[in-house]
Image (cartoon, rainbow, N blue to C red):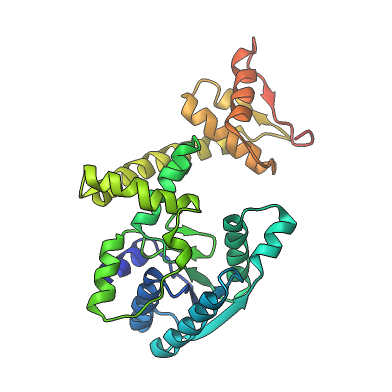
Amino acid sequence: MTDKVLKTIEDCQMLLGCHTLGVGLSGGADSVCLAHILSKNKEKLGVSVIKGIHIHHGIRGDEADRDLEFSKNICEKFGIEFVPYYADVPTEAKKTGESIEECARRIRYDFFKKSGCDRVATAHNLNDNAETFIFNLTRGASLSGLCGIPYTRDIYIRPLLNCSREEIEEYILDNQLEYVVDSTNLCDDYTRNKIRHNVLPLLFELNPSFDKSFAKCLESLNLSKEYITENARTLFEKSKSDGYYDCKVFDKCHKALKYQVVALILKEENVKNISREHLDAILGIIDNCSSVFSIFQTEEV
């Protein structure tokens, strides 16, 4: 498994120019596994400092205190720095109107950005990607949403994305590593837990090698996404004119490309919360005009 993780890091160029590497360390099996692999291969990876970043969300009382102390001890054992952060997620969620899940995630990533690390590795694995795929599927996601968790995004890297939960558990066992269990992961109060406990087991029942089949499916989806995105980016750049975007450049293209070009234009103009309905409305304007024309003048968007 170590070879697979190191290959993922190399293939995706995750640590180019990285001096200080952070690891999101909850104390669970996935994050302990990741911290162990990275700390053992620190010199090979070419990083100078590794920090174990632990977020105390202020949710689970004594259990959260236990996880923090455990994570601190793990960092000492692995020879990496320990960086704790304390937050009151329930109070913050009430203020913002977010769910506990949404608020905890936002706070977690906000602190990661402030941690002083060049990169932060999170322990998302292949099973997590399957959960994300199913979650996005139920919400009517586009191709991008169905492509799952990216290997890299901003400063964040996911070296375990090609590893299944079964492989991680085997690594933990083989290396006699200890870890803690978050009790909230055992109930179905959260959407991801419902998928993890109820949907994924059925898929593995239908196909015991579902994780491997899913990985192949994800690879195909990502290849399609890369192809469409690259071509859309080219058309987007060609459509730029003096203060507007020329629709003639992409008017006759396949609808899949037109969706992506319009999305890129809206993103360029800092339009937020873009929905499929918005894209359909804009494409309708373009398609129904008697003559091809230019829209999206920058001063009006």
Left or right placement of residue 1 versus residue 178 in this view = left
Quadrant in the rendering for residue 238: top right
* Residue 135, image x, y percentages: 46, 44
Residue placed furthest toward the left: 208
Left or right placement of residue 72 versus residue 279 in this view = left
* Residue 179, image x, y percentages: 38, 77
Residue placed furthest toward the right: 299
Any part of residue 130 in sight: yes
Q: In the displayed structure, would residue 229 be above or below residue 3?
A: above
Please count the marks in the image.
0
Taking depth in this image into account, of 100 and 60 the one nearest to the observer is: 60
Q: In the displayed structure, would residue 173 be above or below residue 134?
A: below
* Residue in the picture at 64% in, 25% down: 282
Any part of residue 216 in sight: no
Left or right placement of residue 227 versus residue 270 in this view = left
Quarter of the picture holding the N terminus? bottom left
* Residue in the picture at 26% in, 73% down: 171
* Residue 136, image x, y percentages: 47, 42
Quarter of the picture holding the C terminus? top right
Q: In the displayed structure, would residue 295 be above or below residue 47?
A: above
* Residue in the picture at 58% in, 66% down: 108
* Residue 185, image x, y percentages: 44, 62
Taking depth in this image into account, of 232 and 196 the one nearest to the observer is: 196
Taking depth in this image into account, of 300 and 8 the one nearest to the observer is: 8
Left or right placement of residue 45 versus residue 97 in this view = left
